[in-house]
Amino acid sequence: MTFTKNGKNYLCPVEAALDVIGGKWKTLILWALGEDTLRFNELQKKLFNINTKMLTKQLRELEEDGVIKRTVYPQVPPRVEYKITDFGKTLIPILEALSAWGADYLGLDGDSKHKCCSKSKKVNSDKEN
């Protein structure tokens, strides 16, 4: 049996889920966004090694799948913001579980914080101090 969504065919629900959040950058983009609304350059700064072309591609795919919302403001210079949709927020517990699993795998204790795993609000508060 196959399943179809957005013109794509899947053999199982896990395949569909991995298509939406799979790859190196999509989960990190979602984790960086968290509950925040961020501009393109802010996202790029949080994701140290991603180039502009790849970030643009991944953001478009996440938007196409309904996981993030892109808002363009008609001004000069153009302002574009990204945030997780309500549908996308259903992925946050999955991302938190992945983070916990990764911390266990790396042998980190529960109090350890790493920049890529800190929620956006924590990273911003660190900058203020």
Image (spheres, grey):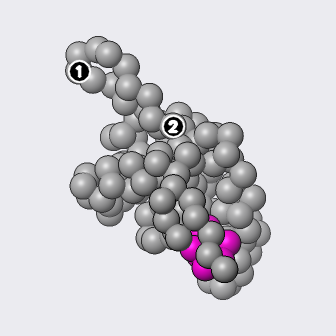
Q: Is residue 46 visible?
A: no
Q: Secondary structure at mark 2?
A: strand
**Mark 1 Cα-neighbour bin, 10 Å: few <14, some 14–19, many ≥20:** few
Q: Specify the principal SS of the magenta part.
A: helix
Image spot of residue 25 (x, y percent): 44, 64
What residue lies at 57% left-to-right and 73% top-to-bottom?
10
Horizontal side of residue 112 vs 47, given as left or right: right
Residue underneath mark 1: 77
- At a point 68% along the width and 56% down the height, the residue shown is 91
- Residue 9 placement (x, y as % from top left): 53, 70
Q: Is residue 105 visible?
A: yes
State which tag comes first along the sequence, 2 or 1: 2
**Label 1 SS:** loop
Q: Camera-side residue: 30 or 104?
A: 30
Callout 2: 10 Å neighbours few (<14), some, many (20+)?
A: many
Choose between 26 and 114: the one closer to the eye. 26
Does residue 13 belong to the magenta stretch? yes
C-alpha gap between disc 2 and disc 1: 20 Å
Q: Is residue 1 inside the magenta stretch?
A: no
Name the side, left or right, on which 72 lies relative to 109.
left
User: Where's the C terminus, which quadrant?
Assistant: top right
Please say if 125 is above or below 64. Answer: above
Instruction: Please provide percent x and percent y for residue 82.
Output: 47, 37
Q: Residue at x 37, y 30 (%)?
A: 80
Which quadrant of the rendered structure holds the N terminus? bottom right
Residue at 62 percent across and 75 percent down: it is: 2
Q: Amino acid at mark 2?
A: Lys
Segment tinted magenta in the rendering: 10-18
Instruction: Work out whether 45 lies above or below 113.
Output: above
Q: Which residue is mark 2?
A: 69
Say if mark 2 contacts mark 1, CB within 8 Å.
no
Q: Nearer the viewer, mark 2 or mark 1?
A: 2
